[in-house]
Image: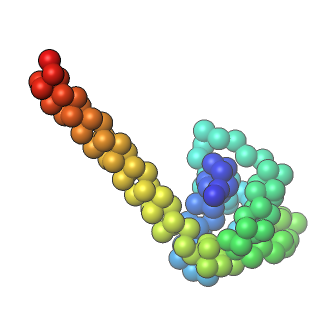
């Protein structure tokens, strides 16, 4: 399970790869896609990218182009399934909320029936 920072960076990487197997991006490209309300520096970005690489979401190779650090990212199966997994997690949360609402409604109705029988 990814934490909030890893989730945001994985979303950025997935969108930059745009459905292809891989992409060549700079830290500035990734930081530009991230939400503006959260601040990331390049050291944090490197740490999180390494963590995602270790978790098996993509292969990561560091490179330099004209003195600028670049990342060569090749998505693995977990990386391709990231979007689908996120949608499934959202569906599960929605289902749990619906189930909780249904339980509360059943408890309310059961309480009214008991109150009318014994009250």
Residue that appears at 24% across and 39% down: 106
Q: Nearer the viewer, residue 52 or 64?
A: 52
Query: Is the residue 116 above or below the residue 54 in the image?
Result: above
User: Which residue appears at 72% of the width and 57% of the height?
Assistant: 28
| Horizontal side, residue 117 vs residue 82: left or right | left
- For the rendered model, the colour scheme is rainbow
Which residue of the protein is positioned furthest toward the left in this rendering?
Answer: 116
Residue that appears at 15% across and 22% down: 118
Which residue, as the protein is rendered here, is positioned at the far right? 67
The front one of 80 and 95 is: 95
Q: Residue furthest bottom?
A: 21
Q: Nearer the viewer, residue 27 or 110?
A: 110
Q: Is residue 6 visible?
A: yes
**In the displayed structure, does residue 116 sit left or right of residue 70?**
left
Determine whether 102 is above or below 68 in the image. above
Residue 24 visible in this rendered orientation of the protein: no
Instruction: Residue at the far front: name it.
Output: 118
Q: Decide if residue 45 is on the left or right side of residue 23.
A: right
Query: In which quadrant of the rendered image does the C terminus lie?
Result: top left
Query: How many numbered dots are placed on residues in this image?
Result: 0
Estimate the x, y position of residue 11 in percent, counting from the top left.
58, 60
User: x%, y% of residue 76?
Assistant: 65, 79
Q: Position of residue 57 (x, y in %)?
A: 67, 71
Please provide percent x and percent y for residue 1: 63, 58
Identify the residue at image location x=56%, y=68%: 82
Where residue 113 sits, quadrant-wise, is: top left
Residue 7 in which image quadrant: bottom right
């Amino acid at each position: 399970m990814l934490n909030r920072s890893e989730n945001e960076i994985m979303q950025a990487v997935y969108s930059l790869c745009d459905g292809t197997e891989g992409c060549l991006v700079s830290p500035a490209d990734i930081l530009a896609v991230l939400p503006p309300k959260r601040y990331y520096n390049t050291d944090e970005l490197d740490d999180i990218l390494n963590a995602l690489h270790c978790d098996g979401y993509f292969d990561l190779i560091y490179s330099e182009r004209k003195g600028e650090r670049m990342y060569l990212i090749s998505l693995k199966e977990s990386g391709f399934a990231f979007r689908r997994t996120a949608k499934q997690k959202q569906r599960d949360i929605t289902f749990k909320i619906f189930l909780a609402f249904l339980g509360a409604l059943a408890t309310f109705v059961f309480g009214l029936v008991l109150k009318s029988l014994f009250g």
